[in-house]
């Protein structure tokens, strides 16, 4: 047996909104789009979007490393996402992590290399 692709699935109350959120936020490419199962490819990784979710806050385990976290936070908000709390720079630890939520309640992290 050979693995041909790895996918990570998210549930969404509004699958189109969720698919377009990740496409727009991370400049992803929609590889498949239907009301049953859709896919967006981001940096070579495939995220599947399945409709029928409840829209409840859910931790996904997904992390997206970006080159500009401050810009990513601004883009997140412009695309309809939010933060669980505003990240802060400290003298000991410069800004490198943001806890994020998509419009369907899926929680994920955005990080920047220290």
Image (cartoon, rainbow, N blue to C red):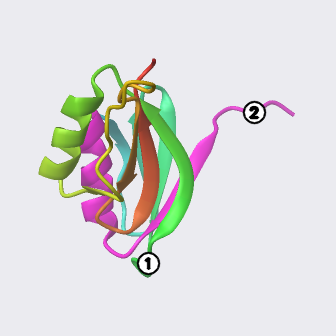
Q: Are marks 2 and 1 in contact (CB under 8 Å)?
A: no
Name above or below for residue 103 compared with residue 91: below
The range drawn in magenta is 1-27
Camera-nearest residue between 113 and 24 = 113
Query: At x 32% / y 32%, what residue is drawn?
Result: 89
Residue 72 horizontal/vertical position (percent): 25, 35
Name above or below for residue 105 compared with residue 74: below
Camera-nearest residue between 96 and 58 = 96
Please identify the quarter of the rendering in which residue 69 is found.
top left
N-terminal of the two: label 2 or label 1? 2
Camera-nearest residue between 100 and 9 = 100
Query: At x 23% / y 31%, what residue is drawn?
Result: 70
Crowdedness of circle 1 by 10 Å Cα count: few (<14), some, many (20+)?
few
Viewer-side label of 2, 1:
1
Q: CA distance from mark 2 to mark 1?
A: 32 Å
Residue 11 horizontal/vertical position (percent): 48, 67
Residue furthest bottom as drawn? 54
Query: At x 44% / y 35%, what residue is drawn?
Result: 64
Please name the residue that numbered disc 2 is placed on: 3
Residue 84 horizontal/vertical position (percent): 36, 59
Name above or below for residue 41 compared with residue 82: above
Which part of the image, by quadrant, shows the C terminus? Answer: top left
Q: Is disc 2 placed on a helix, strand or loop?
A: loop
Crowdedness of circle 2 by 10 Å Cα count: few (<14), some, many (20+)?
few
Does residue 65 appear left or right of residue 24 in this picture?
right
Please name the residue that numbered disc 1 is placed on: 56
Residue furthest left as drawn? 78
Residue 26 horizontal/vertical position (percent): 29, 35
Which part of the image, by quadrant, shows the N terminus? Answer: top right
């Amino acid at each position: 047996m050979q693995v041909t692709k790895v996918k990570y699935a998210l549930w969404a109350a509004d699958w189109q909104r969720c698919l377009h959120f990740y496409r727009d936020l991370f400049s992803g490419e929609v590889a498949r789009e239907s009301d049953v199962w859709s896919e967006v490819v981001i940096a070579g990784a495939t995220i599947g979007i399945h409709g029928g979710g409840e829209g409840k806050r859910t931790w996904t385990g997904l992390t997206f490393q970006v080159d500009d976290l401050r810009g990513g936070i601004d883009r997140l908000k412009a695309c309809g996402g939010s933060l669980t709390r505003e990240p802060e720079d400290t003298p000991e630890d410069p800004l490198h992590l943001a806890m994020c939520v998509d419009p369907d309640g899926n929680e994920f992290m955005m990080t920047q290399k220290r």
